[in-house]
Image: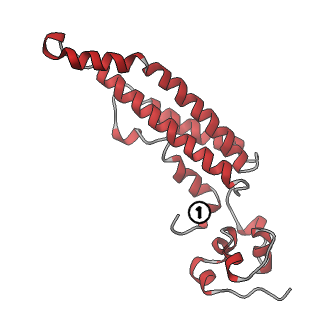
């Protein structure tokens, strides 16, 4: 095989992103994987990519989706809890009180559902990175969850998207930190 030549796309994105995102395949270069592309450019994948490598995009997407769902369930729980803590007499708003009571009766299940989604997210995200960054992933999600649950008593806008913002946490630590426009 002839030595690889940079394309305009590679010049724009950078070699690491070009190889990791598989752009080479749409430019007539045939490699079995991103590591082969990097090696063809004289880069050692073990040292050139200082990030958690995604080995399963499907698990990665499922894990991030589960975190977003958990975040929404927690937000809904917090909102309904806040509603339940409002106090208006039946004389002044019986319809509102009845509505809130119906919603509140199912609210505790949302906490269970959110915990299940977090468990599912951990499972998929650990698999997404080949089970070699488990402790770091576990700690990051637990830290975000801890920040979120601290806001249940008083809704503070800075804390309502802690799990959702894990997307940025993963982007900063995974190979996606080399990607533009994701």
Position of the N terminus by quadrant: bottom right
Tally of numbered discs: 1
Q: Quadrant of residue 51?
A: bottom right
Q: Position of residue 73 (x, y in %)?
A: 46, 32
Does residue 153 appear left or right of residue 174 in this picture? left
- Residue 136 visible to the viewer: no
Q: Which percent across, then down, holds residue 156?
A: 34, 36
Q: Is residue 38 something that shows in the picture?
A: yes
Q: Residue at x 79, y 79 (%)?
A: 40
- Location of residue 23 by image quarter: bottom right
Residue at the (64%, 50%) spot, across then down: 60
Spot the residue most to the right.
1
Q: Quadrant of residue 84?
A: top left
In this view, the residue farthest toward the left is: 92
Q: Secondary structure at mark 1?
A: helix
Disc 1 designates what residue? Answer: 177
């Amino acid at each position: 095989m002839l030595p690889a030549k940079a394309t305009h796309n590679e010049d724009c994105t950078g070699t690491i992103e070009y190889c990791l995102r598989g752009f080479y395949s749409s430019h007539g270069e045939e490699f079995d994987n991103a590591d082969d592309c990097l090696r063809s450019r004289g880069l050692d994948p073990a040292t050139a990519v200082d990030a958690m490598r995604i080995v399963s995009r499907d698990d990665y997407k499922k894990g991030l989706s589960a975190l977003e769902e958990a975040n929404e369930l927690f937000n809904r729980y917090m909102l309904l809890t806040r509603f339940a803590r409002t106090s208006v007499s039946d004389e002044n708003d019986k319809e509102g009180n009845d509505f809130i009571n119906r919603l509140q009766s199912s609210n505790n299940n949302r906490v269970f559902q959110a915990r299940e989604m977090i468990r599912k997210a951990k499972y998929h995200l650990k698999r997404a990175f080949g089970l070699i960054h488990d402790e770091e992933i576990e700690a990051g999600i637990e830290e975000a969850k801890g920040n979120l649950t601290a806001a249940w008593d008083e809704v503070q806008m800075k804390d309502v998207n802690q799990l959702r913002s894990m997307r940025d946490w993963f982007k900063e630590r995974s190979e996606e930190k080399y990607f533009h426009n994701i």
